[in-house]
Image: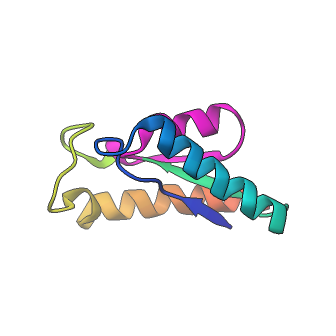
């Protein structure tokens, strides 16, 4: 399985992030074509959504759904503690089970 996270579009242009992620995915697909390709929707949102819309990857859980304030990156990673972490893990588990049947 390939999980592509990406980088923050706050410092790297979305087009560059998209090209880098696409190049990585295409290279891995050439090496092993049958691997599921999943992407979490988070800080590289524009590039990740574009890859999912093109069918290059399967759209994974949106981390914003775990945040108290959507689209606001919390430096303490509060979205990955307690119930947020559990919700994110369960969402991934469901997607992986569905994708890898």
Q: What residue appears at the point 67 percent right and 47 percent down from the top-left corner?
A: 57
Classify residue 1 as left or right of residue 88.
right
Name the quadrant containing residue 79.
bottom left
**Residue toward you, 87 or 100:** 100
Instruction: Look at the image and tell me in which quarter the C terminus lies.
Output: bottom right
Asked if residue 54 lies in the magenta stretch, the reply is yes
Classify residue 2 as left or right of residue 100.
left
- Answer whether residue 100 is visible to the viewer in this image: no
Residue 2 location in percent, x, y? 65, 64
Q: Is residue 75 above or below residue 15?
A: below
**Residue toward you, 98 or 11:** 11
Q: What residue appears at the point 29 percent right and 41 percent down from the top-left corner?
A: 10
Name the quadrant containing residue 25.
bottom right
Q: Is residue 34 above or below residue 10?
A: below
**Residue toward you, 8 or 55:** 8
Instruction: Look at the image and tell me in which quarter the N terminus lies.
Output: bottom right
Residue 98 location in percent, x, y? 70, 55
Residue 62 location in percent, x, y? 43, 44
**Range covered by the magenta-colored residues:** 42-65
Q: What residue appears at the point 58 percent right and 62 percent down from the top-left corner?
A: 3
Asked if residue 61 lies in the magenta stretch, the reply is yes
Q: Is residue 43 above or below residue 35?
A: above
Q: What residue appears at the point 39 percent right and 46 percent down from the top-left corner?
A: 42
Color encoding of the figure: rainbow
Residue 18 location in percent, x, y? 54, 42
- Answer whether residue 44 is visible to the viewer in this image: yes
Classify residue 30 as left or right of residue 71.
right
Q: How many marks?
A: 0
């Amino acid at each position: 399985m390939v999980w592509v996270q990406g980088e923050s579009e706050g410092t790297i242009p979305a087009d560059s992030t998209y090209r880098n992620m696409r190049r990585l995915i295409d290279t891995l697909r050439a090496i092993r074509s049958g691997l599921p390709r999943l992407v979490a929707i988070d800080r590289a949102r524009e590039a990740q959504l574009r890859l999912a819309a093109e069918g290059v990857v399967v759209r994974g859980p949106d981390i914003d759904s775990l945040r108290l304030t959507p689209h606001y990156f919390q430096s303490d990673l509060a979205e990955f503690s307690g119930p947020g972490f559990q919700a994110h893990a369960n969402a991934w588990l469901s997607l992986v089970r569905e994708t890898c049947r």
